[in-house]
Image (spheres, grey):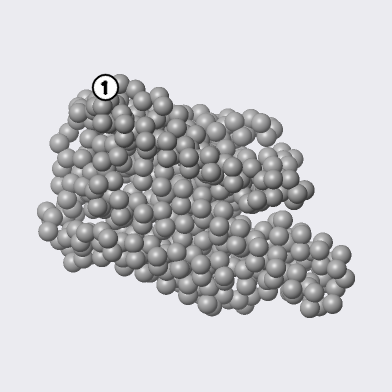
Amino acid sequence: MDGTAPQPTDRIDRRGWLALLSIALGVSVVIMDATVVNVALPVVIEDLGLTTTDAQWINASYSLVFAALLLTLGRWGDLHGRRRLFGAGMVLFMAASLVAGSSQDAAVLVGARLVQGLGAAMIVPSTLSTINAMFVGRARTIAFAVWGSAIGGMAAIGPLVGGWLATDVSWRWAFWLNIPLGVVVLLGVALAIPETRDPAAVPGRDPMGVLLSALGMGSIVFGLIEAQTYGWWRQDDGTVSPVPFAVAAGVLLMVAFVFVEHRRAERGRHVLVDLGLFRLVTFRAGVVAALIVAFGEFGLLFTLPLLLQGTLGYTALQTGGILAALALGTFVVSGMLPQISKRLSQRSVVQTGLALEALAVGGLGLVLSMTISTWVLCVFLFVYGVGVGMATAQLTSLILSDVPRDESGQASGVQSSIRQLGSALGVALLGGLLISRLGAATRDNLTALGLPARAVDGVTSAVTDSAGIAIAGLQAHPATQSVAQAASDAMVHASQVTLWLAAAALLVGLLATVALPRTAAGADDPVPDAAEAP
């Protein structure tokens, strides 16, 4: 490619398809890596002899860097080139994956995950803003459908790949797999993706904005992630928890960030985020909906793997296979979205998707039991996947629909940060709810069996500390069958409560979309015909 900025097009030619598939594969590498690592983590802990703290920081380090730098790097892409940022981020992500897969101790692995988080923070906003700059009309609808399907599908396929690698190959390939995929992405970047940037940007730097946004988002996400470790107010030893201080400091820093950006904009100076974006109804209402939806969507993806592997007796590979039904639903509906969008507005597509997600999550909570069949699980997950395929892509498209394409990088960084914050809230609140209900129900069920208080305390502690995974060990021994049944019933109950709350959050997200305008996709230009596909 010659790197010149193209005019956005409403038709997708062969080069456009190659660019779009390269973008989708790039974001897929990031999403799949996170889910693969989650499934492979127990094997990593055993192989490297990691402590609980080490294991927590393998994921926390990645999440902190990713959340802290999304705003900064999204704006950097607007100024200096989104294609350049995408390619550099992929190279960095590949290099960090090589180091992570070769790690022999916790320090190296956590350090590699930090760099992976930096690479991911470069990739995700640059993919969104590039799509927004390259396509308009029906072509943009298709492009965001492909992008959203890549995220939803890979979030479901990742556990299957991770289970297979951890079981039959090596956990190290959970990281090394990113390298050949990254090479393919870089070829697509070189051959098909044009360079785009914001030519109207005010030149200069905003170091205070960068510092405040990074520290603010990092502090908030740290507090939310570590709430389960340190407690919301006090730690297990009675000392004060750092969590409320981290969250409060993060909120104050973000308030200061807004104040600083507003003052700089008034003086005509370069800003990290144009706060005027929030005057756009689609952007303002869309990011609120995205925050709530990200919170609700976490409930299913967090709860179900723990329940399947720890209580219902599925292996990691079988769990990945069940979650693949979610990916199938996402992929199926992505092929139908161009036709659906001829008949429904974008808002209606988003609302239908969220309704299907809430129906699937809430319905699964109603029918969940120790004897639930695999096919029933797959049906609910398929419906949920259809909802994700409809809601995720089109909500993102709506958020960016009125954003000037030259500012799409910073807008992408803002909406990605909001989604990351929603996921972190899900980790803290829905994850905390699952563990607290699991502990209370386990204690009640064991007490009802007439067990001594010391035994009740010991089993309850083992079950809650492992998030239910210890139940599988109790089920394996005939002497502890009654105890295992009590703990299993508690896990099912806790999972039901968590799923119902997640469904309620999705319904609130659905209500939030009422503020979005009815963007009539059918009024746009025609969908590219089949001959234009590669």
Instruction: Identify the image quadrant of residue 391.
Output: bottom left
Residue 435 is situated, as x and y percent measured from the top left of the image, at 65, 61
- The structure residue drawn at horizontal position 55% and vertical position 60%, both measured from the top left corner, is 430
Q: How many marks?
A: 1
Q: Nearer the viewer, residue 427 or 310?
A: 427
Q: Is residue 442 above or below residue 31?
A: below
Q: Is residue 247 visible?
A: yes
At horizontal 74% and vertical 75% (from top left) the residue drawn is 445
Q: Is residue 267 above or below residue 398?
A: above
- Choose top left, top right, bottom left or bottom right for residue 240: top right
Q: Which of these two is toward me, 500 or 479?
A: 500
Q: Up-down: is 195 above or below 482?
A: above
Quadrant assignment, res 306: bottom right
Q: Position of residue 238 (x, y in %)?
A: 75, 49
Residue 127 image point, x, y percent: 33, 40
Disc 1 designates what residue?
A: 203
